[in-house]
Image (spheres, coloured by chain):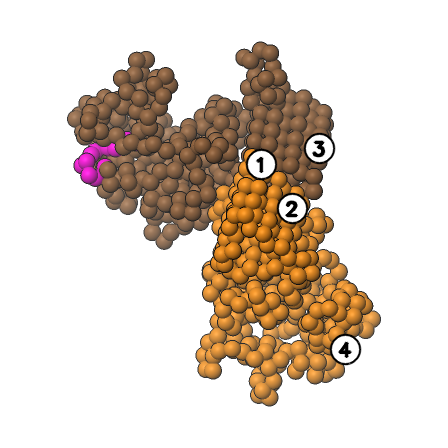
Chain colours: A orange, B brown
Amino acid sequence: MAIMANVLGLIFADMHDFTITDLTKLRTMGSVPYGARYRLIDFTLSNMVNSGITEVGVVTKSNYQSLLDHLGSGGEWDLSRKSGGLHLLPPYGQGAGLYRGRMDALFGVMGFIVSSNAEYVLMSDTDVIVNIDFKKVVDFHEEKQADITVVYGSGNYNGNEMPTKTVLTTDNDGRINEILLRPEITGEEVNTSMNMFVLKKDFLLKLIKENAARSQFSFEVDVLQHKLSDYKIFGYKYECYYEQVDSMLSYFSANMALLDRKNLSALFDNDRPIYTKVRDEAPVKYGIDARVKNSLVADGCVIEGTVENCVIFRGVRIGREANVKNSILMQDTKVGDRSEINYVIADKNVTIGGYKSLIGTSDYPVFVGKNSHV
Amino acid sequence: MLLAGGQGSRLYALTQDMAKPAVPYGGKYRIIDFPLSNCVNSGIDTVGVLTQYQPLVLNEYIGNGHPWGLDRVHGGVHVLPPYESAAGKKWYSGTANAIYQNISFIDRYNPNYVAILSGDHIYKMDYSKMLDFHKKNDAAATIAVLEVPWEEASRFGIMNTDENSVITEFVEKPKEPKSNLASMGVYIFSWDILKHHLIKNENDRDAEKDFGKNIIPAMLSEGSKMVAFPFNAYWKDVGTIDSLWEANMDCLNPNVNLDLYDHNWKIYSRTPIMPPHYTGMNCKIENSMVSEGCIIDGEIDFSVLFAGVKVEEGASVRYSIIMPNTVIKKGAVVEYAIVGEDCVIGAECEVGKPPEALEDKDNWGVAVIGHQVTLSDTTVINPKAMISVDN
């Protein structure tokens, strides 16, 4: 049985930024708002903490101001500690700047990894929304005596979107025998990587040095694919509910999925809470003519109009007789009296005046950028 | 120095296991959040919280003071229970005695001024303006006062002042009030003068060791300069079931001058770790406050729901206050009621009734369910009833 205090968590906050450029223009993937009061990184970070990991490094590349602001000293995740705790790892040192792949990023933070006393490293991106017990993954890794364990799930994906997923197949024992990067998927059920990996610290350090010497920057290409037969690379199948964000449309549907009570309770209704930054907002106030239906609403909102099938973030104001449906309104967005909103994603602090109409469609929600006035 | 040891005996079942300042209020707060947040927002970074009655909930709630930004290297928040010393064991025997017993705590910080606040009032106030007023007037003590309706003046400690706001007379609950300026229980003292009076009062065997009854009159009779600082926003003493209910309903009243959404004067509180609240397909929520972690499938009207409350389909909650993690089961009707923390109101229960439903208005009142009570299905709880775990 794994002792989770021996596991170092490493979160890559910038991976997959390119899949949702509208939302990552001004922030990292990890700090993309999600689910009415969270940022994507909250899930992986909370999962690590709830699994017993007490030392976490967050690797960033650029646009990390909002991430720093969100994470602070890590106190909200109980990671403000004398030993271990949360470490933010922005670009640093010689040739610092934009890394060219996961191995390159790891080379940049090698000093941090070396200084940890951990036996294992758990690496995770922030594109997956899940409530997972990482202890089971590390136990699996030990049991299989794997060199690398890749967490994966399975699902059907249609071929309409830009291919972004890492698709894999395993043998009966769980050993991965094929890995494809961004293949075209046409509706069949496939196993896709959740971009979470476990490996021994010493083994990881060996890989980092080898790859650096050969100027190989990608973990997926240069390790998972090219060393598939050299190393014991296993897949841990995660069977429960999760969402993976890899396009604006999947971002939209991952939010809307929370309006299904099964999904909501799979993520939140257990003894592994999802932590986030506290904003000290008052409870939601519903006005005298408010109508609300099938929605998720975070603290600090004042709602005087109609809200249906929506995810409403903290501090949103919805005016009298305004009609908001099928939309995601991020922090501090204001909708004026009698405005009509349908299939809209409004980034933070958007102001929509009174008597306005903004209508998208279910397969192409309208995106309104941060601080915009409509 | 925040006086938080009060029992709040007129809140009965609600204060059975917790001191009055720890009683939940306004959908996510506890009463003490108001004076604590006022301190922080006014720039006071060293706060002593004096506890005595049922301090467990309060101690745990305040913790290291982090939610209020009071986990400081210098100062911060300190919970100050009564203690045993070489001179013996002594409970706090009055408000003045409580401060007297903590003179050495205050002296450690060597302050020029000390604010004495009570931990059980709902209001937003900038104490720094009051301190400016205190300094400008070169006063020994400044007492915050509120204009109350003349007909209610005889329920308060009333200040008579001259044209310069200098207090000329202080009368506790006067039968024939000469003024309608009531003390809010918010004082600023110059510390050396207060210390002198605390020691003197302590040595007077007959004194009740109370600020209103002893310290203020003694200072007046010695001719210390005391001024009244006028306050004219929302202030509420939530000492009774009715006033606690009213104060919560005030949160829903757009005409009440208590803005909980003002980012320039936030009321901080310890936030439970819960997801946003979910409103179901067939729910109806009007003129209410709903907090995080709630799941609402029933009807909510003119009510305040704390974190983690569940209202099942067909249930309705009207003119009521539902404290954290309580479940209202299918078809239950809760009206004009205060329901405590962690309760279960069984299916088809009826709790409370509107005043118009009763012929004899004297028998009407807000129904109260204490904390951790489970009502089996179809139980009927009359208006004005008081249910607690013990009975």
* Residue pictured at 49% horizontal, 56% vertical: A373
Left or right: A342 in relation to B218: right
The stretch drawn in magenta includes residue A274:
no
Q: Chain of mark 4?
A: A
* Residue pictured at 32% horizontal, 35% vertical: B116
Q: Which residue is mark 4?
A: A178
**Residue contact at pointers 4 and 1, CB within 8 angstroms:** no
Residue B48's x, y, as percent?
Answer: 36, 40
The stretch drawn in magenta includes residue B139:
yes
**Residue contact at pointers 4 and 3, CB within 8 angstroms:** no
Q: Element type at marker 1?
A: loop
Q: Within 10 Å of the Cα at label 4, are there few (<14), some (14-19), or many (20+) other Cα atoms?
A: some
Left or right: B184 in relation to A237: left
Q: Chain of mark 2?
A: A
Q: CA distance from mark 2 to mark 1?
A: 14 Å
Of label 4 and label 1, which has the lower sequence position? 4
Q: Element type at marker 3?
A: loop
Q: What's the magenta region?
A: B134-144
Q: Which residue is mark 1?
A: A289
Q: Residue A43 occupies which quadrant of the picture?
A: bottom right
Q: CA distance from mark 2 to mark 4?
A: 44 Å
Q: Element type at marker 4?
A: strand
Residue A11's x, y, as percent?
Answer: 57, 67
